[in-house]
Image (cartoon, rainbow, N blue to C red):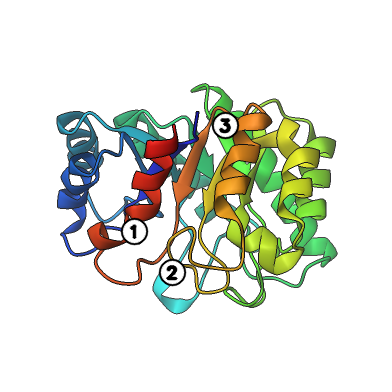
Amino acid sequence: MMPRFAANLSMMFTEWAFLDRFKAARDNRFDAVEFLFPYDHPPEAVGKALKDNKLTQALFNCPPGDWANGERGLAVFPERRAEFEASIGKALLYADATGVKRLHLMAGIARPGDPVAKAAYESAILFACDRAALKSLDIVIEPINSRNVPGFFLNNFDVAAEIVTRLARPNLKLQFDIYHRQIIHGDVIRGLEAMMPIIGHVQTASVPERNEPGTGELDDARIFATLDRLGYTGFVGCEYNPKGRTVDGLGWLKAMRGKA
């Protein structure tokens, strides 16, 4: 066995235009994809690219606000609640077009522990979960390390797990990014073992450079074997920056397939 890998088209296959990356992923034997955001393209065009290439959409993010100017989510801002609620409606339109089963809700930039941001964030999570539940979709929340995104509100896996457990929405899950976990806490395998019951999506990249699995400080093959041992049946998003041409860096995946 081996996990089901999804190519992240925001970071991989960038040698092609976005809508052409779907075919590139299929040509390289991926059967699922994810990406950060689809919103620069009509939902029908994204859906067609998936269908034409017989790909499953594993995940994408809800609109983050003004990404180009450093925004990384709207959920922590009570004064922007109307904008946030509209962004969830937009994400659900793309969910309909792509058939995705889970959406990542980014928190935003705010001081961790700030009570106003915390209340707004948790209220926003509940709103998103309730809207997503009407379409049988999951919402996932992801801790992100402060080195890559300084000031990100959700930067601790234990805090994220506590939120998921306390809010107790059946469609609220943890997004466990191996790269972020290693930078924030380390102890990746123990973290997976402890949090597997609430994990809804996994992502991977080498540490510390965020390149292909197998090129950093972690034993990525052992981690993937742990996912199998724990019975994880979801996707593992390949959210890494290829060192060179994407196709040239896929030796790790060919090796994994050879062992399967």
* In this view, 51 is above or below 252: above
| Quarter occupied by residue 106 | bottom right
Type of amino acid under label 1: Ser
Mark closer to the chain start, 1 or 3: 1
Q: Nearer the viewer, mark 3 or mark 2?
A: 3
Mark closer to the chain start, 3 or 2: 2
Mark 1 vs 2: CB contact within 8 A: no
Q: Which residue is mark 2?
A: 67
Q: Which mark is residue 138?
A: 3
Neighbour class for label 2 at 10 Å: few (<14), some, many (≥20)? few
Residue 205 picture location, percent across and down: 50, 59
Q: Which mark is residue 206?
A: none
Type of amino acid under label 2: Trp
C-alpha span from label 3 to label 2? 23 Å
| Quarter occupied by residue 5 | top left
Indicate the secondary structure of the residue bearing disc 1.
Answer: loop
Mark 1 vs 3: CB contact within 8 A: no
Mark closer to the chain start, 1 or 2: 1
C-alpha span from label 1 to label 3? 21 Å
Q: Is residue 61 visible?
A: no
* In this view, 87 is above or below 93: below
Q: Nearer the viewer, mark 1 or mark 3?
A: 1
Q: Which residue is mark 1?
A: 10
